[in-house]
Image: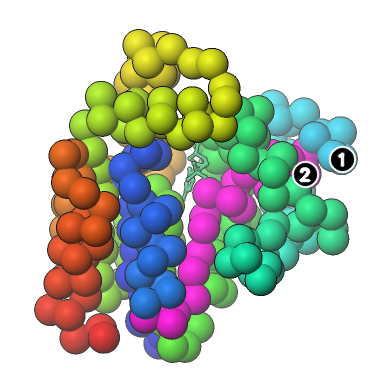
Amino acid sequence: MTGAPVITIDGPSGAGKGTIAHRLADTLGWHFLDSGALYRVTGQACLIEGVDWGDHAGVTDIARTLDVSFTSAASGEVLVAYKGQDVSRAIRTEEGGRGASTVAAIPSVRTALLQRQREFAKPPGLVADGRDMGTVVFPHAQLKIFLTASASERAERRYKQLIAKGESVSLPRLLEDIEERDARDSQRSVSPLVPAEDAIVVDSSGVPIDEVFARVMGYVADKGLK
Ligand code: DC
């Protein structure tokens, strides 16, 4: 432990975690950990190195020695590189998401990435975005938020994002995918998606993002973190 304060933002995908966590880190001037990106890069590195996602020992070796870097572009966009090669786009595709969720279910991969995630906790502080930030990676975090939203609202948000990108998608199909993924994520044996006992659960269903942010900032102030 470095002693730097940590705020964890956990929850299912589509709940607005990324937006809230980024904004929080910017507002406080703290470091930011996108833990999902580490799992995504691990999956991508396997594709690059020719390691099958089902080869647990091979994937674990990749995770242990993962040469990954995050740099902020002038546009504010975060560029993610593996061995110096820009993989920012590749890791955000549907295949990138599948790879991440496959490798994230391997216990030895999670262990291999644990210390690396903890190293992000440096002064003046860290905002950590993920699924198990408050339960496993930073159990002593000063503030733990579990951000959620109904499955139907998350499906609608995802639908709008994909349509804006010009992709053709079906809303009922997206809802089905989200419900399946929720069940898989919350029932898996290692680091399941559950709120930490001391987490504050924030339901963003029907709440504008600015209002969600204001509520979170209220909790930050209550803890004396700003
Ligand atoms: O947050 P994201 O969609 O980029 O996460 C990608 C995948 O990684 C997702 O399937 C869940 C998994 N993940 C995880 O198991 N633990 C984390 N702390 C973050 C992400």
Q: Return the x and y of residue 141 as percentages of the image width and height.
A: 31, 72
Q: Nearer the viewer, residue 105 or 101?
A: 101
Q: Quadrant of residue 221?
A: bottom left
| SS assignment at label 1 | helix
Does the magenta stretch mainly form a helix, a strand or a loop? helix
Percent coordinates x, y for residue 209 in the rendering? 26, 52
Residue 102 visible to an observer of this rendering: no
How is the structure coloured here?
rainbow
Q: Residue at x 49, y 76 (%)?
A: 31
Q: Residues within 10 Å of mark 2 (few under 14, many from 20)?
A: many
Residue 148 visible in this rendered orientation of the protein: yes
**With 30 as the anchor, is 194 left or right in this view?**
left
Identity of the amino acid at label 1?
Glu
> What's the residue at 59%, 51% (across, down)?
37
Residue 34: mark in rendering: none
**Quadrant including the C terminus:** bottom left
Where residue 128 appears, as percent x and y from the top left, is 42, 64
Q: Is mark 2 within 8 Å of ligand 1?
A: no
Task: Indicate which disc residue 45 carries.
Answer: 2
Residue for point 25% across, 24% down: 152
The disc labelled 2 sits on which kind of residue?
Ala
- Tell me the distance, in whole angstroms, between the alpha carbons under discs 2 and 1: 6 Å
Q: Which residues are magenta?
A: 28-46
Residue 36 colored magenta? Answer: yes
**What residue sits right under mark 1 in the picture?**
49
For the residues bearing labels 2 and 1, Cβ distance under 8 angstroms: yes
